[in-house]
Amino acid sequence: MKRTEIINALQLAGEGQLINVRGWVRSRRGNKNVSFIALNDGSTIKNIQIVVDLAVFPEEQLKPVTTGSCISATGHLVASQGSGQAVEIQLTELEVYGTADPEQYPLQKKGLSMEYLRTIAHLRPRTNTFGAVFRIRHNMAMAIHQYFHEHGFFYFHTPIITASDCEGAGQMFQVTTKNLYNLKKDDEGKIDYSDDFFGKQTSLTVSGQLEGELAAMALGKIYTFGPTFRAENSNTPRHLAEFWMIEPEVAFIQKDELMELEEDFIKYCVRWALEKCQDDLQFLNQFVDKGLIARLESVVNTDFVRLTYTEGVNILQEAIKNGKKFEFPCTWGDDLASEHERYLVEEHFKKPVIMSDYPKDIKAFYMKINEDDKTVQGTDVLFPQIGEIIGGSVREESLDKLNAEIERREIPMKDMWWYLDTRRFGAAPHAGFGLGFERLLLFVTGMQNIRDVIPFPRTPKTAEF
RNA sequence: GCUUCCUUAGCUCAGUCGGUUAGAGCAUCUGACUGUUAAUCAGGGGGUCCAAGGUUCAAGUCCUUGAGGGAGCGCCA
């Protein structure tokens, strides 16, 4: 008999029709006359209740139906006599696909901490919380593709293995096929990569932006969406060594339009979640973060604040004058500390802030320099609780200015000649941003730790599963 | 990487000033219950107190070192 997914079965009217559902047992309870199985197949956070008449199915036959086991259940879909659900299945045929020894199966009905679930990351998708998170993760990926597709962007695939080591976004993981204990070295003791797989030193990408800029100079509007790797020893609830990043790059737009894009894009994704992930969000709102749905709705309905770095520093210095205490000083030219950003977003404005026009020395070499020659057209989106969710900028399109910046910063561009060709041949004004996918998910799910919004987190000293 | 906190039953945690046989809830097992919703009720089993070393008549408890984990900071997305 054809399987009905539980999400669909729950939509049907219980008219006694025979259906088949398959999934994993969440719990079984009852008395000596009747047994109730809560079954979940991942299609929705909701379980379907299967009612077993113990006169037809003796207890002995139900023995293997324990929490975590996998079954196929066929029966009549009827209106439920109980109050917790509209419909339920009166079991007529049972097949046990896989048992789960209850003495050993680690998932219980309650009391599991996120830290513990991380130690069983191979099983945690079976919990309500992680089922919800990963369904939302899928939905956000779809929302992102849909947004860009609707707006005329092309999904452009940038390489994961790269030979450029100056992207400036962090420490890189090296890629090699050589025996690390017997490396060929030159007279000065430096490693000779000429006999390595690619004939040169290669690494995992820390950003697809530079390649994305090449594409924008041909296709006009592109975005990348792929894994990114950073070998930084960052131990925080907001950092991963392997994470997914979305990087749109657009020709012919200026700073205002870039900020509009950033705001419109995030709102689109959040709106998508509110519309299409209601059941999962309601669960998370109830058990993980009581203010979640209200916060998501407020982001969709408020205008983000536009604030220059200089204005931000003025507000902070004013606050300090009025007695606000910070751990770190706030002086023009220094990067804002987390506590400064949080003050602006969570206390002063109480809404998302797009901060722009940072001092050039605290930002990357490719950002467009303003006429004051002191600031660059970076545009970062700062979110409550998460901090920087988007880092964007207008790119410097002038070859001379870009070269001057590269020289001033002594950036090794030997393997990057191709990037400069975007400025050498048909240079165009353009801009783009990078969004950390998992940081978006932190915001949309209300989860506290980034390790809990990616199925298999990679962080310093952790690559289990 | 720095700072700080934590590590006791399968899970979540108590454990007083260092002092008898280390406790609870949940889970699990056994039984009861005529439809349960984190079912309920009764009972049973379950411990290398993270590891090593030290102080002491006596260490889960104090000290040192190490490992693992959380949080804050830095770096960033």
Image (cartoon, helix red, strand yellow):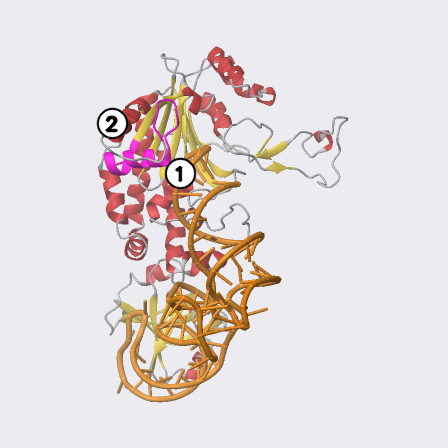
Total count of labels: 2
Residue at 52% across, 17% down:
A406
Q: Residues within 10 Å of mark 1 (few under 14, many from 20)?
A: some
Quadrant location of the C terminus of chain A in the rendered image: bottom right
Q: Amino acid at mark 1?
A: His
Q: Which residues are magenta?
A: A329-353
Quadrant location of the N terminus of chain A in the rendered image: bottom left
Q: Residue furthest right?
A: A187
Asked whether, in this view, residue B23 is left or right of residue B40, the answer is right
Q: Is residue A310 above or below residue A262?
A: above
> Reading the chain from its start, which is encountered first: label 1 or label 2?
1
Question: Where residue A318 is drawn, which disc sits there?
Answer: 2
Q: Is residue A97 above or below residue A189?
A: below
Q: Position of residue A194 (x, y in %)?
A: 72, 29
Confirm whether circles 1 and 2 share one chain. yes
Residue at 48% across, 28% down:
A209
Q: Quadrant of residue B55?
A: bottom right
